[in-house]
Image (cartoon, rainbow, N blue to C red):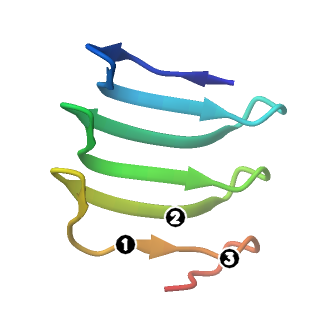
Amino acid sequence: MAEAYVIDGKPEGLQVSWFGNGLKSSEANFKDGRLEGLSAFWYESGRPKAELKYKDGQLDGPSTDWYGNGFKKE
């Protein structure tokens, strides 16, 4: 399941999706149809999977990945 906003055919604002178990699977912000700010992803267990920062649709700054057991990957 997902919640998304679209303006003039482009994603805009906060976009959220959930696993079938009700836990959040991803969260991303869009501005003018491009990724902007923090995007976060989770495993179905609820543990964090990744955090990435975007500016004008391009990766910007450090990103973090985790293994499914909760340990930081990189």
The amino acid marked with disc number 2 is Ala
How many other residues sit within 10 Å of disc 3, few (<14), some (14-19) or many (≥20)? some
Q: Earlier in the sequence, mark 2 or mark 1?
A: 2
Looking at the image, which residue is at 15% across and 50% down? 56
SS for callout 3: loop
Q: Is residue 45 above or below residue 9?
A: below
Mark 2 vs 1: CB contact within 8 A: yes
- 3D distance between C-alphas at marks 2 and 3: 9 Å
Q: Which residue is mark 3?
A: 67
Q: Earlier in the sequence, mark 2 or mark 3?
A: 2
Q: Is residue 51 above or below residue 24?
A: below
Q: Is residue 64 left or right of residue 37?
A: right
User: Quadrant of residue 67 in the image?
Assistant: bottom right
Q: Position of residue 60 (x, y in %)?
A: 20, 67
Q: Position of residue 2 (x, y in %)?
A: 60, 25
User: Quadrant of residue 48 in the image?
Assistant: bottom right
Q: Is residue 56 above or below residue 51?
A: above
Q: Which residue is mark 2?
A: 50
Looking at the image, which residue is at 32% across and 37% down? 29
Q: Which residue is mark 1?
A: 63
The amino acid marked with disc number 1 is Ser
